[in-house]
Structure formats: structure tokens, C-alpha cells
Image: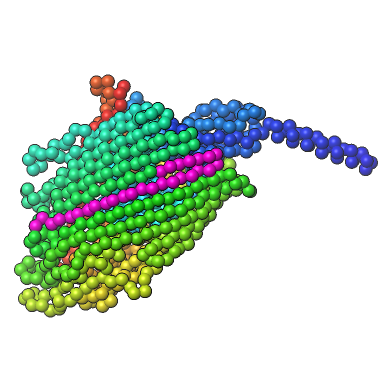
Amino acid sequence: MKKRLSIDGVLLALLLCSCAGIFADTLRVLRGRVVDENKLPVGGAQVKLEVAGGQTFSAATDETGFFSIPNVPIGEYTARVAKPGFFILKDQKVQLAADSSEFEFTLNHEQEVHEKVDVVESANRIEPTETAQTATLTATEIRDIPVPSTHTLNQSLIALPMVLMDAQNLLHIAGARTNQAQYLLNGFDISDPATGALITTFSVDAVRTVEVQSSRFGAEYMHPAASILSFNTPDGDDRWRFNTTDFIPGINVQEGVQLGNFYPRVFVSGPLVLERLWFSQAFSVAHTLSIISGLPSGQNETNLWSGSSLSRMLWRAAPNQSVQLSFLYNDTSNDNQGMSTLQPQSTSLTAGAHQIFGSVKDQIWSHDTLFEFGFAGHQSYDNATPQGTAPYIQLVNGAEGNYFESVEQQGLRYQGFTDFSNTSLHWRGTHTISGGANLSSVQMTQTAARTEIEARWADNTTTSRLSTFTGSADFHLSNTLAGGFLQDTWTLNRHLIAMVGVRGDWDRLFQAGMAEPRVALNILPFTDDRAKFSIGWGRYNVPLDLSVIGQTQDQAQVDTLYDRSGNPVSGPATSQFVMPVSGLKQPYFDIASVGWEDRFGARTIVSIQALARNEHNGLVYETQTPFQIGSVFLLQATRQDKYRAITLSARHNFTNGAELFGSYTRSRANTDQDLDPILGRLYFAPQQPGPLSWDAPNRVLSWGSSPTPLWDLFFSYLLEYRTGYPFSVINQYQFLIGPPNSHRFPDYVNLTIAAEKKFHFSHRVFAIRVAVINVLGRQNPDVVVNNIDAPNYLAFSGGQSRAVTGRLRFVGRK
């Protein structure tokens, strides 16, 4: 009996081994690569294979464009490949045979096809391998969403839930200061070298995608601080492309017949050498005429001129190597900068600025490894000059005279980096190992001249405070920054993806290094990737603002206070900014976040994201003698900004090409030290906590677009509601009254709707769009009388009134 059982066991084992061998012969590891129209690798593309009967297999491409799917039975499959910014490749037949298991798919970047409106099937899906909290705008969305100023790229960014724009048109991403983000153009830092703000501009038509990362981003980014804003531009391909927009100038008849708003843009791209060398060129010119109500005729106009040129070239030097070159120039001039209902023409500035940026990047890939080498140079120049030399007079409800400050600033940055990404390591899953190093040098030079500031009592006859300046206002600063990183993105299986990285940065001005660990985890509970849970934490270096350090090299301010009879009651007393003897600590953020994304059906994505960010060692000036004029403002690394936010969003794509997006964000952006004293605006109160000036606790955002059967019109809209921004109150002496930012503007509501019609003319296709801005006619003021001694205290003014705008663009030939 035992012998019979033994024989049966052997036969069973042999049968199982035979079946396993037969089954193994029917399974293959499917390997492939995704490239674009120029045969360059496309990372982060989602590849999905489906066999008749419903079984699916999926994977994501790495940085070199490669992907692999194990244990795929031989047979015929239908492939679908998708990534934002590209046309979706679908219904592609793939025959997996016993002797063939490698394939190549080509994704084409989105380009408008003039024959119809719904040219792109939106890739409304969850990205399984994306650990960062990310929001993206494609070129199609930038073109279609009717923001108030469609010629200004920064205006389009307000269509993202985490992006706010203040009254000075500065961006605040995830509740952070405008210089606490990293702004990238094709992977290179384009923030102003001196201040860290985004002042570089280029044509709206020169953008393929804009991506914002507000948490859980990797270690490869140098000085990202609170967030990363990336602009990606087209390189051209083997097809010649041309478009132009707003090439007919507007006429303004408010103050006689004159040139009105004029925003011509031209974009052209194509091959210099077929299949080897491509270029793209984007030009834009903008003239904005603003008529400010409440000011005398002839003294109520501002003319803003700007122009930009962005050149790109892509050279496919070898089948596995590409070289990218960029050159950007922009120039801006404003004859009456700063003019408003409370600041008449005489107090405005004649301002100008230009930026020059050039970069080169070399990419080499070899099977599982991508190598990158890059270098860029960036020069910025800004100047502002008063309209005359008359004294600058601050009234309780405005100003008169000529502005007190003439300033010229120059910034310079050189940056270089090298990095690699490798996916050849397989141990309990797949590992993408990346690492690299970077080095940059930044410089700032300032030349300035200041006259006196006279603040007057409410009767406008006697002086209440007189400020003068002493010492040199000219200085030069420089800094060197170096860093490196190592990171592993570990795909344990299709349900679990972990990112673990560490970055080290060194700063010459701080004379210290910093280690910055970062971790993130994606959990995909279902086999069809319809839901994703993400959690992460990281430490992020805050970029240094040279203009803040420069205040210690600038002039001193001398103040004298007077009574109503004109007799001095205090001063003259001198105030100045100084550096601490013991040095400073490097500022950084701790950022933690958690998120859930869920796909309902094939076309609806709902997500909820929670974010908590804490600043440590933030730079701030603290008065050493509170409540009295004449003080030493000591630079300290003690500020702690905090941001908390929960964002609920939903997006649905309809079968006819229409789409609908909506989000609600509940947030709080505050700090323990809310005052930022600068020359000409010194508060002698001690530092106090309060909301930041762009804090908006409630924000509702919605936009959408749809083709309609009515005359084939394409309808679009943008709706934004948010809590009004906070502001502070001052008194007759220009002293702070009460806590900082203790008052708020009225709530902001803006609805813009637009309708576009395509038409044929002379064998060409054009599109004309009419948009109505601020349909509801809300005042939405951005100016307030905040002097408590003014007779019209808390009077609000300014804001965008209801307006009708038009846009005409050339789409292509029939």
C-alpha cells in the first residue's frame, strides 16, 4: 500500500511539473517602450493591455520610457497608452508570441486639430506611480479656460485649487510666500535670482503643460520649499506648425480714440533636419491700457508694454541621446506703475524690467538608465523711477507728490546639475534608483536713491511724521549653493509603491549643510487602479532671498514725530537692519500630507487631499525696542509659518469632449510673526501672530467647457469664490493699530463665461471668442483706506468691473 502511494506521488509530481512547464511556455514578460513623435522617451505613461474576455495587465513607464509586465499569456491584446499632455493611444493591437515580447508605442503631444473641437480624449485617470500631490493644466485647458487675462500665463494658474494670486499679481502656492516655491522651465530654475519670485514671462502658446506639486515630491528638487511649479514647452517635430492669436489691435474710446489692449502672439515650430533637428519659436507682445476711475482725465491711464521671445531647439544627436537648448528674453515697461484710486499719477513710477535666460540639457539613455547633464544662466534687471523730485506726502486717505524711492536691481544665477535614473534593480519588486548633484551661484546688485517721506494730519496742513534716509543704498551680495540626492522608488507589486529619498544641501551664506529625508507611499487597493491612497512626509530646504539679507546692507531710516501744531514730540531717531553676530540657521519646512483618489465609472475622478506644513527657522526682522521710533531691526531665524488645508475636488469628462471641474478648499495660512518691516514702511510694534496677507480660509473653484449644437459654439466658464484677503490698520503716524491683518476685504466672487466659434476664411480656419468677465458685476475691491484717522476709513475701491473681451486666433489651414 505504501509503495502504491509512493508511485502515485511521483506520478502526481511529474504531472504538476509537466503542467507547470506547459503553462510557463505560454507566459512571457512583456517588455516595451513608449516614445514621443521625436523618438524621445516618455516617462510616467500608463500602459494597459486588455484581452478579449476582460482580463487586463498594466504598468507605467520609467524615466527611460521602458516598462515591463510579467506573466502575460501569449495571444492578442488591445493596448491603451496615456499620459497628460499627449493624445491617448488606444485600440492598438499587440500580438504577444512565443518568440516576441518587446514592443514600442508612440505617443503624440496634444496639438489642436482644426476640423473639430473635441480633438482630445481627456486622460481622466489615476496615476498609480505618482506619489506627489500634483495638479496639471494642459495646453488645451490653458487655451479654453476663460481667465480674466488670457494673454498672461500666470492668470491661467488660478484654475488650479492650490494657486492664489494677490493684488500685486504675485503667486502663492499652497498658502506659501511667493518666494517659497521652486519655479522651473523645462527642469531649470527661472525664479528671480535676487528675490526668488516668479517675474519671468513667456507666451501662453509656448506651454505644453503646467504642473504644481504641493507635497510628497521627491529629493531631486533643489530648494523647493513649499511647492514646485513646472512649465514644459514644446520642441517641435517633423511637421511644420504655425498659429497666431489676437493679431488685430483693440481700440479704446474712453478718453478719445487710442490704441487699446493688444496681445498678439505667434508660435511656429518644425524640422530643421527631418528626424534629427527640430525647433520652436514663440513671440508675444502685450499692450494693456487701464483707465482708473476716480482720477482726473488725462492723469488716469496706465500703459503696460511687454514682450517675450522663447526659442527651443532639440537635436537628436544619436538614437540614445538628445540635446535641448533654450533661450528666453522678455522685457516689460510701465509708465505709471502703482497708480490707483488712492495713488494718483504723480506718485506712480516709471518702471522697466528684462530677463535673459539660456540653458542646455543633454540626455543619454541606455536601456534601463537615463543620464542628464544641464547648465543654465539667468540675468534679471529691474528699475523703477519716480515721476519727479517733489516730496512724497502720505495722506490719511491716499498720497500726493512724487514717490520717494528710485531703485535699480540686478540678479544673476548660474546653475548646473547632473543626475541619473536606473530601473535595472529587481528585488522583491522593481526599484527605480536615482541620484545626482547640483551647484549654483546667485548674485544681487542694488543701486537706490531715496528722498523724504512726509505723513500729514487729517487736515492736510501739518506734518505728523517725517522720514529721511542716510547712508549708502548700494550693495552687492552673492551666494553659492550645492547639493546632492539619492532616491529609491520601489514598486513592491501593483498595489504598493514606496518612495524613499534623502537630500543634502549646503549654503555658503549660512555656512551649514542640511539633510532632508523624504518618504511617500501609494496603496492601490483594487486591481483596476480605480483608487489610490497616498501618504507622505518630508523635510524641504527653503530658498534664500538675497533681497532680505540685502536690507542689512541698505540705508538707515531717520524718523521724527510732530504734534498737530507742527512741534516735534519724538526724534529724530535712527532705525537700521542688522545681521546677528552668531549667524543664522537654514530655514526649512516639514510637510505632511495624505490623500485619497477614486474613479467612478470611466470618466469621473473624486479626490480629497489634506496638507499640513510647518516652517522652522524662518527669517524675520524683530525690533529690539518695541513701541518707540528708532530701533535696531535684528534678523532672526525664528519665524514659524503654518499652513493647513483640506481640498475636495471632482472632475468629469463627457463623451462629447466636454469636461467639468470643481473643488472646495478649506485652509488656514498664518504665522507667529506677521510683520515684514522695510525701509519706508517701518512698524515699531513687536512681532505678533496673525494670518498671512493671502490667507483665504474658504475657496470654491469651478471651470468647464463644452461644444454645443447652437451654431457649433464652444462654451466655457470659470467661477472663483474665496474669502477676502486680510489687511492691517495704521494711524496718523503710520503706526500699526491692533493686531496685524486683523481686517479683511469683502469676499471675492468672479464668474467669467465665453463662447468661441470656428470659421473658414480664404482656405484657413480661425476661431473667435467673446468672453464676459465678472458677469455678476461684483466690485471685488483690491484697494482700501486703512488709516483709522481718515474720514473715509475702510472705504473700498478698485477691482475688475464687468467687461467684454474678444480673442481671435488662427487655427490652421483647411
**x, y percentage for residue 434?**
51, 49
Determine the residue positioned at 17% across, 49% down: 334
Q: Which residues are drawn in magenta? A: 361-388
Tell me if 734 is positioned left or right of 371 in this view: left
**x, y percentage for residue 666?**
38, 55
Magenta stretch, overall SS:
strand
Determine the residue positioned at 35% across, 63% down: 670
Q: Quadrant of the N terminus?
A: top right
Could you tell me if residue 650 is visible in this image? yes
Residue 613 part of the magenta-drawn span: no
Residue 385 part of the magenta-drawn span: yes
Q: Quadrant of residue 282?
A: top left
**x, y percentage for residue 232?**
38, 42
User: Which of the two residues, 66 or 292, is positioned nearer the viewer here?
Assistant: 66
Query: Eyeballing the image, is 546 above or below 139?
Result: below
Tell me if 92 is positioned left or right of 309 in this view: right
